[in-house]
Every structure is written in structure tokens, then in C-alpha cells.
Image: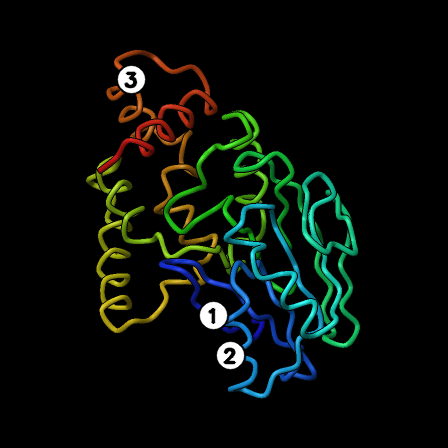
Amino acid sequence: MLKTSPVRAFSDNYIWLIHGRSTPSRVAIVDPGDASPVLAHVERHGLEPEAILVTHHHGDHVGGVAQLVRHFDIPVYGPAGERIPGRDFALQDGDHVRLERLDLDFEVLGCPGHTAGHIAYHGHGALFCGDTLFSAGCGRLFEGTPRQMTDSLTRLAALPTETHVYCAHEYTLSNLRFAATVEPDNQAVVDYTERANRLRAGQHPTLPSTLALEHEVNPFLRCAEPPVIAAAERHAGTHLNGEAKVFAELRAWKDAFA
């Protein structure tokens, strides 16, 4: 398992620091929406940033890039299909990011839906997926279609089940409330909610999750499961033909969920 450190930003963002495998003091910075907490963290812990990895263009993921580049003079990797400030390497699905000084190699996975050019980084048993996949949830569709997001989530869900999921927001408890509404008899949701409540009560992150857990609790990865289909159809008041239709109904339901 990779050594990582979460840096909290704004109200619920995590900026992930990925430590080098042979040199843990060297780090890559994932989705730095704000430079200030990153600068404070690396100074406090004596860390040396080597690169910035960006998943998509939203301000809470790129707002700190320019300041960090000025401070550390490090390369920026980001999706080719989106406007990323200071980007040095434009990445597309199937590319690899090799960070020699960290002894790290990540495969780039295209996962449009939340935004049109969203990417994720997969390697070393870890998935840095930005706002595509959350624990017990998924991102809103700002630029993509339900079909695109369904395909993206299906692709991520097909990775090894032991994969650790590093998403960018602490949305787990609110997502679990929705998951329990969709599947009130899902014991895995009940158990995870209890564990997540304990973690948050102690001011600890609920992340990373694992894909094995997400397969059990995340309604957006369970659109082919009969209880999820039935719940979506009850909410829609009509038959839903196919996973993309079920997903679309769940996403619209979640968007309005209190």
C-alpha cells in the first residue's frame, strides 16, 4: 500500500500527497485546490514536492497549482481535454505517468462524466479518482452524460477489488444516508455508517475506501442489483431499461436529496 497523507482544504476537500516508495520525504501532490495548507504541511513535515497530478479543471482542484509551481518549480500533469493552469504534460486515456524520483508509475484512465475530460491515476494498488467516484457515491454530472458516467464507473469498478480509493471529498456520511434510503436492508451500509461515524467523531478521514467495500455499499456501482433497480423504479414511477437509466434516476434523486 502506498504511503499517503491527506491535506484538508476548504470545508471537505482532501489534497492527497503521495510519498515516494524509496524516498518518503519526496511527494507528488494530487488536486491542490489551495496552496496554503500544502505549503504548511510540507514545511511542517520536511517534505519535498516533485510533481502535481490533476484530475480535472474545477477550481477546488487546481486553484493552488500556480502558487505551488512558483514555489517549487515542479511539473504539472493533467487531462489533455481540459484547461489546466501551468500544465506541462497533457494526459489521455492509456498514458503513463512515471515519477522517477518517487519510484512511482501510474496509468491514466479516462473517466468523463463529472467533467468532459476527467481522468484518474491508477497504480501501486491505489486509485486517485478526483470527483468521479466517491465513497458510497459519485460526482455530479456537470459536463457529461449518464451513459458516460456509467461507463466510467463501470471501468473503475472493474479494477482489482483490493484497490484503495482516494477520492477528493469527505462526502461519505452524506452519501451513506442516501445509500441507506436506496437500500434500507443493506447490512454493509449499516456497518459502514457506524464505522464512518466513529472515524468522523475522532476527526479522522473515512478515506481511503476500497473497491471491495464500494461494491457492497455504493448504489452507483450497484445499478444492476435488483434492490437498487426496484428503488430507482419506485422513485421514477416507471420501468427503467438498463443500467444507464437506473444510474440517471439515482443521480437525479441524489441531486435533490436532503
45 lies above or below 114: below
Residue 61 sits in which quadrant?
bottom right
- Secondary structure state at the residue bearing disc 2: helix
Q: Disc 2 residue type?
A: His
Residue to which mark 3 is pinned:
236
Q: Residues within 10 Å of mark 2 (few under 14, many from 20)?
A: some
Q: Which mark is residue 41?
A: 2
> Which quarter of the image is occupied by the C terminus?
top left
x, y percentage for residue 64? 57, 61
How many numbered tags mark residues here? 3
Q: Earlier in the sequence, mark 3 or mark 2?
A: 2
Q: Disc 1 residue type?
A: Val
The front one of 67 and 118 is: 67
Horizontal side of 135 relative to 167 (left or right) equals: left
Q: Disc 3 residue type?
A: Ala
Q: Are the residues tagged 2 and 1 within 8 Å (C-beta)?
A: yes
Residue to which mark 1 is pinned:
7
